[in-house]
Image: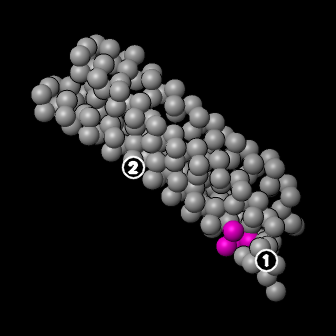
Amino acid sequence: MVETFGGLTGLQWALLGAAVAVIGGGSGSAMGITYIANVAGGILTEMPDHFGPLLPLVVIPGTQGIYGFITGVLVAFVMKPGAGWDALTGALGFQIFLACLPVAFVCFSSGVYQGLTAAGAAGMVAKRREEMGRALVLPALVETYAVLSLIVTILMFFVVIKPAYPG
């Protein structure tokens, strides 16, 4: 018999956590990229030679989606599929779900805000192309919090949860 927690099995909780992390990171990235791409598109209609300097600003909000993807993949390692799905208790699956939440929430919001910050920085590049380095620092500051959320999630996976795995 498979042990449940809150009506869900451990596998269901773990997969829900992975899904929430991937959806949160991916959605935040998609929205953030949309914001900066709209601004960059407007700039490029007048200054097509600014494509190169604007491209990093357009791409950088996409990293939150990557962090969500990494979290989703790491869930598979934490679940230890070789032990059998029944070995993942409901309570342990819930812990995996909780460990996914920092990436899910922080990457969703930071992806959006990074896109908005990059959109503002694109104005610097439009007026003074040589300011690209400084302009990139602004959205990179927002990136810090997405990276910290990924680090917290990884620590929860491999320091807090892994030693508690049965067997």
Element type where label 1 sits in the image: strand
Along the line of sight, the residue nearer the viewer: 25 or 39: 39
Q: Is residue 37 above or below residue 70?
A: above
Q: Mark 2 points at which residue?
A: 30
Q: Residue at x 77, y 73 (%)?
A: 6
Sequence-first tag of 2 and 1 = 1
- Amino acid at circle 1: Thr
Q: Mark 1 points at which residue?
A: 4
Please tell me whether residue 11 belongs to the stretch shown in magenta: yes
- Amino acid at circle 2: Ala
Q: Give the image location of residue 115, x and y in percent.
A: 40, 37
Q: How crowded is mark 1: few (under 14 residues within 10 Å), some or many (20 or more)?
A: some
Element type where label 2 sits in the image: helix
Left or right of 155, for residue 136: left
The answer to which image quadrant residue 54 occupies is top left
Left or right of 154, for residue 23: left
Left or right of 59, for residue 4: right
The answer to which image quadrant residue 120 occupies is top left
Q: Residue at x 57, y 31 (%)?
A: 144
Q: Residues in magenta?
A: 9-13
Q: Quadrant of the C terminus?
A: bottom right
Q: Is the magenta stretch mostly helix, strand or loop?
A: helix
Q: Residues within 10 Å of mark 2 (few under 14, many from 20)?
A: some
Q: Residue at x 38, y 20 (%)?
A: 135
Q: Which residue is drawn at 75% across and 64% down?
A: 94
Q: In this view, does 133 lie above or below 44?
A: above
Q: Give the image location of residue 161, x and y in percent.
A: 80, 55
